[in-house]
Image (cartoon, rainbow, N blue to C red):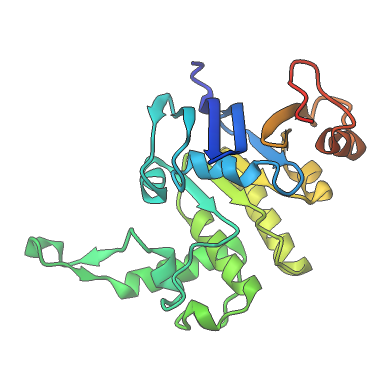
Amino acid sequence: MSEDIILETRGLTKHYGGVHALEDANFVLRKGEHVAIMGDNGAGKSTFVRQITGVEQRTRGEVIFDGQPVNFAGPLDAREAGIEAVFQTLALADHLDVPDNLFLGREKTKWNWLGPFRFLDYKAMRQDTLDALQKTGVKIPNIRNTIQYMSGGQRQCVAIARTASFHSKLTIMDEPTAALGVQETAQVENIVRQLKADGEPLILISHNMRQVFDLVDRVVVFRRGRICANLDIKNEDVTGEDVVAYITGAKTQEGYEDAA
């Protein structure tokens, strides 16, 4: 395995009974690279990400992350290994406020010299939350409010700020701007650009063709649970119409099995 590869899947497959949601997905992501995953609804995009991050357990196949085979028991294991993810379900705790959500599972403590007795450092977490929101351009009027009282756009921005605030080896965003307005979408896209400038690799699931061509280096197309195209949009003469043709099955890229 090349040293510049951060993530590789080999034959990654997920069956739900007789439903083959994902079949033999071979995928490579290099360090610093931003790749979009595109496809119609039900094409296997989110299923693919759930296998990588341990949200679900794969039927078969291998996941190799940062040079090592991995089999995460759950998203917390993936996070500890260096994978930050924003899912469509957001995975926020509604009854907690913004700092508690940003630091959920990695809380800051004080008075650690007391041995097993430790106390949460709320002041430090609140200040770091304000710094994170300022860094990402996310505007939350009152960070002490619980998530349940926030709009869908604010909740999405909190999830994205949480992901972008901690240095990671890989960031995954599943339709991060689907519920956002124009201004909030621009903020998220700026976060993605900053990740690129920082050299952090990204997997972006999106239906937004303009966004994809603006932000990523490569597009991997899923159709009916299989990868059917791998398009270098920065160095090849690829158009949005070409991507749509692969999504719909009107075109099939050489070397990939027709998923029709």
Q: Which residue shows up at 56% across the image and 55% down it?
A: 87
Is 254 rendered above or below residue 167?
Answer: above
Residue 3: x and y, percent? Answer: 48, 19
* Quadrant in the picture for residue 22: top right
Decide if residue 200 is in sight here: no
* Quadrant in the picture for residue 101: bottom left
Residue 184: x and y, percent? Answer: 70, 67
Q: Which residue shows up at 80% across the image and 42% down it?
A: 213
Q: Is residue 96 left or right of residue 133?
A: left
Q: Is residue 122 left or right of residue 211?
A: left
Quadrant (top left, top right, bottom left, bottom right) of the C terminus: top right
Q: Which residue shows up at 38% across the image and 40% down it?
A: 72
Q: Which residue shows up at 31% across the image and 74% down it?
A: 122
Q: Residue furthest front?
A: 18
Decide if residue 226 is in sight here: yes
Residue 254: x and y, percent? Answer: 80, 16
Residue 40: x and y, percent? Answer: 77, 45
Question: How many numbered dots are placed on residues in this image?
Answer: 0
Q: Is residue 254 left or right of residue 154?
A: right
Nearer-the-camera pick, 73 or 108: 73
